[in-house]
Amino acid sequence: MTDAIVYARFSPRRDEEHCISLKTQTDRCRKYIAKQGYTLADTGIFTDTAKSGADSDRPGLWAAVAAIKRGMVLVVYRFDRLARDGFLAYTIERDVIKRGGRIESATGEGEISKTMSPEETMKIGMMRLFAEFERNVIKARTSAGMKYRQSNGEVMTRKDQLPYGWQTDPANNLKMIRNEAERLVGESIVRMRDSGNSWRKIAELLKKEGAVFRNRPSWHHTTIRNIYLRFKSKP
């Protein structure tokens, strides 16, 4: 009997309707394992939640790789659940193969193993490239959608990360309204910089005037520069 383990990754996206849940992935992998006559290993199922396919910092992923022993199979819903970055995908595949295992897709994409033919190797390489391309498309589409919503006053980030000069609307925490106090500081920064002051000098002047950056005790020149660029381009 061949022992198999399952890895699933869920990465919810604000502008993506078709996120594949962990349950959907693991159920499909279980059915595949049963159909192939494999046995789900005692180590079982490994998952990561809210992790990008380009993120190498995934405890569940590396625990799954570490659990692979000679002759075992790592089953995933699709190969892009492992990674949407070409180099990262290659690294994962190499580690599994070095441990004597192989990777199989529950949705019929084939397998990644030491015995792959040149044609199969080329196919997997193309799939890696497509997964990375798709990640970049999703990233660009999501970014465009967030910028559009933000331009219409929708809150698209945590309260402490709202653009300087904006605040959450007390009547609707999903909307942004102008923060007039911060806008006065932003306009002052633009005037001081355009008058020839350095970032550090501006920090000193702001401190002297009693201006604070969102309740923080001091100003950092990088923060001042970012506020200047924002107000200079989008007053």
Image (cartoon, rainbow, N blue to C red):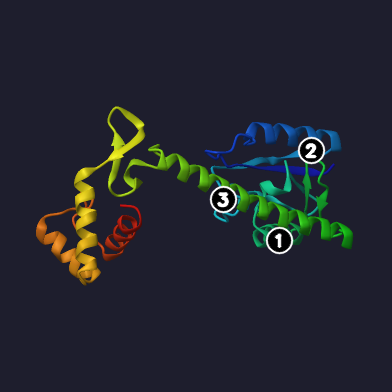
Rendering coords of residue 158 (x, y %): 37, 42
> Do tag 2 and tag 3 residues touch (Cβ < 8 Å)?
no
Residue type indicated by callout 3:
Ala
Residue type indicated by callout 2:
Thr
Q: Is residue 118 left or right of residue 101?
A: right
Q: Which mark is residue 140?
A: 3
Q: Which one is in front, 157 or 118? A: 157
Q: Residues within 10 Å of mark 2 (few under 14, many from 20)?
A: some
- Residue behind mark 2: 39
- Residue behind mark 1: 90
Q: Earlier in the sequence, mark 1 or mark 3?
A: 1
Q: Is residue 86 left or right of residue 176?
A: right
Residue 100 visible to an observer of this rendering: no
Identify the element where label 2 is drawn: strand
Q: Which mark is residue 55?
A: none
Q: Earlier in the sequence, mark 2 or mark 3?
A: 2
Identify the element where label 1 is drawn: helix
Q: Residues within 10 Å of mark 1 (few under 14, many from 20)?
A: some
Q: CA separation, marks 2 and 3?
A: 41 Å
Residue 102 visible to an observer of this rendering: yes
Q: Which one is in front, 76 or 39? A: 76
In the displayed structure, 159 sits above or below 234; it is above
Q: Quadrant of the N terminus?
A: top right
